[in-house]
């Protein structure tokens, strides 16, 4: 297991985390995503382009009532990559946690 260098960058990690919470094929409008990620228009556009080139997101540009609208959603490959990267991050965090602070597995007591 290793880091996914495309997702590892903090803004792209936030983008993928947000898109991963949506239902499959559910899209998020660009300006809503921009507000959630707290990125500038150009910065978000560049990160989405990087994710799209990797095949992690799809982008749809359309017009709604004569106004441009861009919608973004995570692809199956992107969801899989996000889950793998999140597992890698969890493993690092688990290793960094002192053994005494780690949750212990529950065991059942047998009654005599």
Image (cartoon, rainbow, N blue to C red):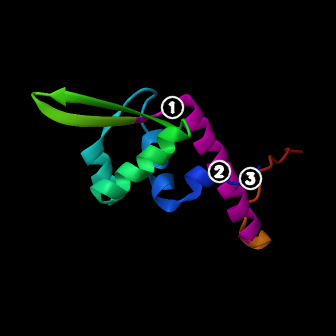
- Residue 81's quadrant in the figure? top right
Residue 33 belongs to the span the image colors magenta: no
Dot 2: within a 10 Å radius of its alpha carbon, few (fewer than 14), some, or many (20 or more) residues? some
Label 3: which secondary element: loop
On residue 17, the disc is none
Q: Nearer the viewer, residue 55 or 74?
A: 55
What range is drawn magenta here?
73-97
Residue at image point 53% right, 38% down? 56
Side of 52 relative to 99 (left or right): left
Q: Nearer the viewer, residue 21 or 54?
A: 54
Is residue 78 one of those drawn in magenta?
yes
Residue carrying label 1: 75
The Cα–Cα distance between marks 1 and 3, rounded to whole angstroms, is 20 Å
Q: Quick one: label 1, few (<14), some, or many (20+) residues within 10 Å?
A: some
Q: Which residue is mark 3?
A: 2
Q: Earlier in the sequence, mark 1 or mark 2?
A: 2
Q: Position of residue 17 (x, y in %)?
A: 48, 48
**Picture disc at residue 4:** 2
Give the residue displayed 80% in from the left and 49% down from the top. Answer: 107
* Residue at the right extreme, as displayed: 112
Where residue 1 appears, as percent x and y from the top left, is 77, 49
Task: Give residue 3's position: percent from left, percent from top.
Answer: 68, 54
Position of 111 with respect to 20 (left or right) is right
């Amino acid at each position: 297991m290793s880091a996914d260098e495309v997702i590892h960058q903090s803004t792209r990690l936030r983008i993928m985390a947000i898109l991963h919470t949506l239902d499959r094929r559910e899209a998020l409008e660009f300006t809503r995503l921009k507000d959630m990620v707290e990125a500038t228009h150009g910065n978000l556009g560049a990160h989405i382009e990087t994710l799209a080139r990797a095949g992690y997101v799809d982008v749809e540009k359309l017009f709604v009532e004569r106004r441009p609208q861009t919608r973004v959603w995570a692809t199956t490959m992107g969801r899989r990559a996000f889950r793998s990267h999140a597992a890698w991050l969890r493993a690092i965090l688990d290793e960094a946690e002192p053994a005494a602070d780690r949750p212990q597995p529950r065991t059942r007591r047998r009654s005599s």
